[in-house]
Amino acid sequence: MQLYSTNNKSNIVSLKEAVFRGLPEDNGLYMPLEIPSLSEDFIQNLEDFSFQEIAFTVAKSFVKNAIPESDLQNIIEKSITFPAPLVSLDEQYHILELFHGPSLAFKDFGARFMAQLMSYFNKAENQELTILVATSGDTGGAVAAGFYNTPGIRVIILYPSGKVSFLQEKQLTTLGGNVTALEVDGSFDDCQALVKKAFLDTDLTNKLRLSSANSINIARLIPQSFYYFEGYKQIQDKSIPVIFSVPSGNFGNLTAGLFAKKMGLPIHHFIAATNVNDVVPAYLHTGEFHPRPSVRTLSNAMDVGNPSNFARMLDLYCSTWNNIKNDISGYHFTDKQTKTTMREVAQAFDYIMDPHGAVGYLALKAHLNRSSNMQGVILETAHPAKFKDDVEEILGKAIEIPKKLADLADLQKQTLKMSIDFNFFKEWLIQF
Ligand SMILES: *Cc1c(COP(=O)(O)O)cnc(C)c1O
């Protein structure tokens, strides 16, 4: 497998290099040189394959000879360890539940696959790999769980003390083992600044093998295409065109869906569903892209003002607006609309959506109002219990908390308090 940078198509690297670097030096994003086509036979017979078998076939077609089959098999078995069930509300509305992993959000797919891939490539090196991650809350949990117990890798998570939720903090700080949580006496920006400084410090990079678990790493995108196939597989009546509604922030999830379509999965159309941070829906309407600072909403994992994967979307369509809007429609909604919908779906179907999924539901509904002869799959990106306080207030009733989340509350957090002084952080990293 080879990859190029969206800023310079002649800047070509191997999968291993793209995974360890994360970002090309020219500030573009890595894209696969070739998006493979899967055989029609495979796509017509998805029902014959398990989720892991589908994941293996899709991954194999991307990575080709970069990883031997038996090793790839092992990577899939260790990363795709939980299901992605499709729940049908009626004939037209289906929900693909992507929250059955350890951190209860779809980011588990990307984080686990990336961890296994890094561990595999790191075997050829004789030095331990140190992953540095700054988190404002959500990503850290998926990354911590993804890398937990991965041989040859230690993970250092920096989070702002007192500024993440109670359960988020537990997800970051209770694993132990190869995961160390640094409780930084500062803001998220201070955490990010410490990580950035570490990567620029040649003294440090000479002594340690450092990498990041950045969200735009190609290793997080590839596994996200797996569940589009898995979701499509579970649709009963495939004679009705299928559209996917994707609650979006940085647009990694939707970009992975575009990969799946290019590989041959018969997805009729995509819906880019956002909260009021709507720069992509606005682009789809007007052809103009104007990034702007994000505003805080109820669906806060989608509060993104300059979506990082937009460059990949443009690249896939050779920057041609007409082609993009043929495949993707954009809709955006307010928190008020999101809350109303959460109540309506709970009432009508006895199904509890989280605020992010509810934005996807709203967008599908808006689209089906215009073209009713279709059916849609909403990607439910997180378990509602992750947003317990908001969801309970909106629905006016208590919701069930999954055991793995409830159990966390009783675990003791283990952290190391850290000031924002870089030299102290650096010395600690070297000695640790
Ligand atoms: C990260 C996240 C999103 C947005 O996904 P992108 O790939 O950044 O568009 C949506 N919902 C939840 C719950 C998330 O954690």
Image (cartoon, grey):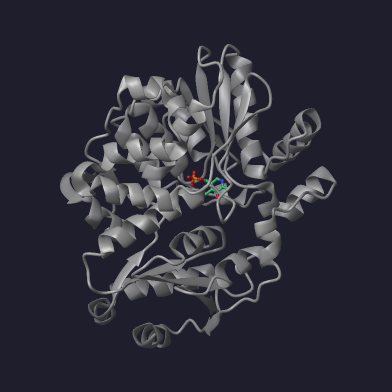
Q: Based on the displayed image, in which of its 4 quarters is residue 204 positioned?
A: bottom left
- Give how far across and how far down residue 419 sits, in percent: 51, 84
Left or right: 387 as drawn, with respect to 290: right
Horizontal arrangement in the rendering, residue 185 relative to residue 307 (left or right): right
Q: Quadrant of residue 151?
A: bottom left
Report the residue that reaches farthest toward the left: 10
Relative to residue 288, is residue 6 depicted above or below?
A: below
Number of marks in the rendered image: 0
- Please tell me whether residue 104 is drawn above or below residue 84 in the rendered image: below
The image position of residue 83, as x and y in percent, is 54, 42
Q: Is residue 28 visible?
A: no
- Quadrant of residue 321 within the rendered picture: top left
Give 27 or 94, whichever is nearer the viewer: 94
In the image, farthest residue toward the right: 396
Nearer to the camera, 10 or 319: 10
Look at the picture and state if 255 lies above or below 112.
Answer: above
Residue sitting at x 58%, y 72% = 174
Q: Nearer the viewer, residue 333 or 350?
A: 350
Please indicate whether residue 307 sits to the left or right of residue 370 in the image. left
In percent of width and height, residue 89 lies at 68, 26
Quarter holding the N terminus? top left
Residue drawn at point x = 41 percent, y = 22 percent: 45
Vertical relation: 330 (above or below) 68? above
Q: Residue at x 64, y 73 (%)?
A: 162
For image coordinates 39% across by 58% down, the residue present is 115
Q: Quadrant of the C terminus?
A: bottom left
Percent of width and height locating residue 91 = 64, 18
In this rendering, position of residue 244 left or right of residue 200? right
Viewer can see residue 156: yes
